[in-house]
Amino acid sequence: MTFHVKTGLLALSLLGSTALGLLGTAVTAQAADQEISWIYCGDKIDPIHEKYIKEWEGKNAGWTVKPELVGWEQCQDKATTLAAAGNPVGMAYVGSRTLKEFAENDLIVPVPMTEDEKKSYYPNIVDTVTFDDNQWGVPVAFSTKALYWNKELFEKAGLDPETPPKTWAEEIAFAKQIKEKTGIAGYGLPAKTFDNTMHQFMHWVYTNNGKVIDGDKIVMDSPEVLAALQAVKDITPYSVEGATAYEQNEIRAIFLDGKAGMIQSASGAAALLKKTNMKWGVAPLPLGPSAKGEGTLLITDSLAVFKGTGVEEKAIEFAKFITSPGPQGEYELQGGAGLTPLRPSAKVDEFVKADPSWKPFIDGIAFGGPEPLFKDYKGFQNAIIEMVQSVVTGKAEPADALKKASAAIEEYK
């Protein structure tokens, strides 16, 4: 990827098939050349990854890493199919949300982290790959969201163009004023049958100190989450019409065309906005009444190590190397890819100083939360999408929709 949080993350996994070759001479028995196969999502390998693959191979004689390019839409299916058929790849790039399902089906091995490794990341990131007190993947790409606003529309609506909303109440009020004063949508709410609809709702949840699941207990039917769903209902009349027709990239395009006052989006939107003549700003996501601090959904993609290849230990070693601070820092700080840094560092500080538009994406991490891990992630995701759509279209009231969804996701945990 670069991080295919293209769905509002995100794009997903990869795998290919593990190979084993032997080298030897008639005179001396030599160690077998061994291969770590890696299904790599996308249509090209990032040059930084190519560079560090060669470096690792140079330090590990007899070992090669063989990436196999697989399109984003096919990556997850290929990884799953190969593993389930007993022909797993050594390593796969997967959406971290799939790790629990892989682990429960005994398809991947744990990738435990030391305390020092855990502490090297920003807060809460390790939670995106952790359940049953173990880590099941190594984060390789990370996305957070912030609020973008169109300063020209703010000014036309009689709002201060330099002052974004800091609370949900202000956000809804600003959206209403923009719609009423300019006739243009004050907000861009995506509610298509698409994974980002669930992601966008989780931003509201995490900016109000809410939670969906705690261990194996569903805790979604709470005042904090109800308030989030109510806020979605309240902003809908002032949002882009027909929310169920749009996913995040389509909403972003509407914003870039000057047809929405505010949107939630990743850092990649800033790169696109810099190529336009629009006057815009980016700020932390507005906070709900129960918020304890700036929050956001923390979406990671990870490298998962598959079981039964015979190269598990070496694959773990490579996965940790390619995502270590040096290589990872180069990979994620290229700009324009929609990636948020996984770890704090002096290099990140310099990056943010040079481009302050990055700051909101990092500030939201401290009180952010992970994609909830479910055995049947798609079942969970679809229940949340159905809940949001029922409220956005007026078919259900927030309290009723929330109770229904909370009961439905019990079977997917």
Image (tube, rainbow, N blue to C red):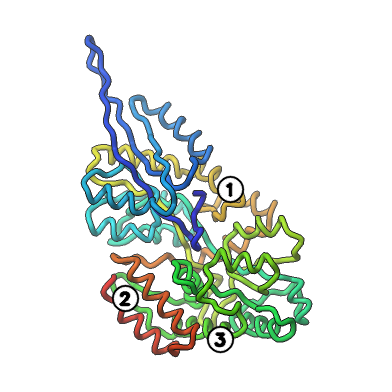
Q: Amino acid at mark 3?
A: Asp
Q: Which residue, as the protein is rendered here, is positioned at the far top?
A: 27
Quadrant, the C terminus: bottom left
Mark 1 vs mark 2, foreground winner is: 2
Q: Position of residue 373 (x, y in %)?
A: 35, 65
Query: Can see residue 118?
Result: no
Q: Which residue: 66% across, 57% down?
A: 272
Q: CA distance from mark 3 to mark 2?
A: 25 Å
From this view, report whether residue 242 is shown above or below residue 21: below
Q: Position of residue 238 (x, y in %)?
A: 62, 83
Determine contact: label 1, label 2, CB under 8 Å.
no
**C-alpha span from label 3 to label 1:** 37 Å
In the image, residue 31 sits, relative to residue 15, either above or below, namely above
**Neighbour tally class for label 1: few under 14, some 14-19, many 20 plus, Cα within 10 Å:** some
User: Image point 50% across, 53% down: which residue?
Assistant: 3
Indicate the position of residue 172 as horizontal and vertical percent values. Answer: 62, 83
Q: Tell me which amino acid carries mark 2.
A: Ile
Closer to the chain start, of discs 3 and 2, is 3
Position of 12 compared to 350: left or right?
left
* Residue nearest the viewer, comparing 349 with 52: 52
Q: Can I make out residue 193 in this image?
A: yes
- Residue beneath disc 1: 333
**Marked residue nearer the N-terminal end (1 or 2):** 1
Q: Amino acid at mark 1?
A: Leu
Residue holding disc 3? 234
Local secondary structure at mark 2 = helix
Q: Which residue is mark 2?
A: 409
Would you identify the image quadrant in which residue 175 lies?
bottom right
Q: Image check: 206 left or right of 351?
A: left
